[in-house]
Amino acid sequence: MTVATLPNSPVRTDPALAGITDRVERGQRLSAADGRTLYATADIHTVCRLADRVRRRLHADVAYYNVNRHINYSNVCALSCTFCAFHRKKGADGAYEMSIDEVRAEAVAAEAAGATELHIVGGLHPWLPFDYYLDMMRAIRTAAPSLHIKAFTAVELVHLARIAKRGRDGYEGIKSVLRDLRDAGLGSLPGGGAEVFDDRVHDTAFKGKIRAGQWLDVHRAAHELGINSNATMLYGHVEERADRIQHLMMLREQQDRTLAAWAHDTGVPVCDAERHDGTTGPAVVLTGPGAGPAWLPTPQTCNTGYFQTIIPLPFFPNDSALEHLPGPTGLENLRTLAIARLMLDNFPHVKAFWIMQSLEMAQFMLQNGADDIDGTVVWYDITKLDGPTTHQETTVFDLQRVIREAGFVPVERDTLYRPVDRSGT
Ligand code: SF4
């Protein structure tokens, strides 16, 4: 049998990426135009290679996972976001709410199974009183004191301020609700509910939910109280790619303000850079050639809370009111994650949330910008990647295996990205 040989084909590189490559090498901030170029190019290899370069500067060959449990305490919601297949109206088929005893039992089981974190979110329940949420925090804190409670998206917290009758106090009302929850046991905030920061997208896909300014305010209030948080971007529905770039820039600008004093104290470089509204301002860039663990904020070195992680979330059309949309492809998911790593030069971590990306894709994403794949999860009601069940569990063995196969050293982290030492257990 003869095998046809192909002529040597040159490696395809896009000259339009030369300037961006230079800026990444020098540790300079990328602009909105750079972000659009990273989306437009056919040279996905260079985009991913640059994201990997930045990721390795920050985290070398380490990749993180954690041992956690998710609790979705109720799917009853006053809103009806068109992209959401999770919510139900009170009394509708499939609507549920967990009692405090049920939440407590889940927490005890999670702690006994070795979890370090509970991730708790739900719908905007129209009738549960604010005391339900405080009691939930206290019950977990008492019954399973070793668990870190990461709970409530920004839109839930605005809802809680309203039912606690502090909604009219605006920013201070949010802050006082956060203070009460923190005193009852809340440890940090997840990043949900951000979707994409754009008014047109908001009014089309999640009208009634809070807008960008309020989402950012909730996280700013948390950071001022010393509470860390994450950020998400739910993409692949009615937004444009340019909207995603704006979303990332708005997150980046808020993090600039949050980390400014810390950067000044620790000597991390600050430069002037473009903002999403065309103005310029001080920028904290953690990803330059001198990057490494010493350039990462920690709860010990930073007096405030800060954004820890960006979690790009692909939209799943199934069962939602936007079911006619195709949803993003694997390559678009990979590109979006790599671009998030490159644009968010002041975010310590990028998570490939395996529940929504699949373990196989998360493994690939570790080589292209991600440094974290989340945890063991067990129950997750918000989206179902494969089939109708909400039981979506993986094991520590499998998490470690996929990380090792991707060429990294698995490190179990707690919610605040401190290594977990299980040698004595
Ligand atoms: S996305 Fe959240 S706020 Fe919107 S309908 Fe679903 S549960 Fe409710």
Image: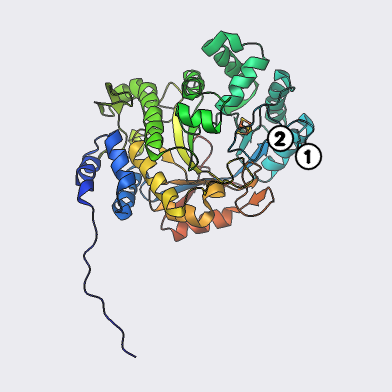
Left or right position of 421 against 377:
left
Q: What label does residue 88 carry, if any?
A: 2
- Cα distance in 3D space between marks 2 and 1: 8 Å
Say which residue appears at 41% left-offset and 29% top-offset.
251
- Camera sees residue 191: no
User: Which disc number belongs to residue 93?
Assistant: 1
* Residue in the foreground of this view, choosing between 101 and 419: 101
Task: State the residue lying farthest toward the bottom.
Answer: 1
| Tag 2: amino acid | Arg
Whether label 2 touches label 1, CB < 8 Å: yes
Looking at the rendered structure, the secondary structure element under dot 1 is loop
Position of residue 393 measured from the top left corner of the image (x, y, whole percent): 64, 51
Horizontal and vertical percent position of residue 328:
48, 48
Colour option used: rainbow
Instruction: Report the image quarter containing ligand 1.
Output: top right
Q: Is residue 262 above or below residue 105?
A: above
> Can you give x and y, in whole percent of width and height, for residue 75 in the image?
70, 35
Q: Are there few (<14), some (14-19), or many (20+) residues within 10 Å of tag 2?
A: many
Image quadrant in which the N terminus is located = bottom left
Nearest to N terminus: mark 2 or mark 1: 2
- Amino acid type of the residue that numbered disc 1 sits on in the rendered structure: Asp
Quadrant in the picture for residue 148: top right
Is residue 313 or residue 236 the one in the foreground?
A: 236
* Residue that lies at the very extreme toward the front in this rendered image: 324
Dot label at residue 139: none
Residue at disc 2, secondary structure = loop
Residue 288: x %, y % from top left: 26, 38
Crowding at mark 1 (Cα within 10 Å: few <14, some 14-19, many 20+) = few
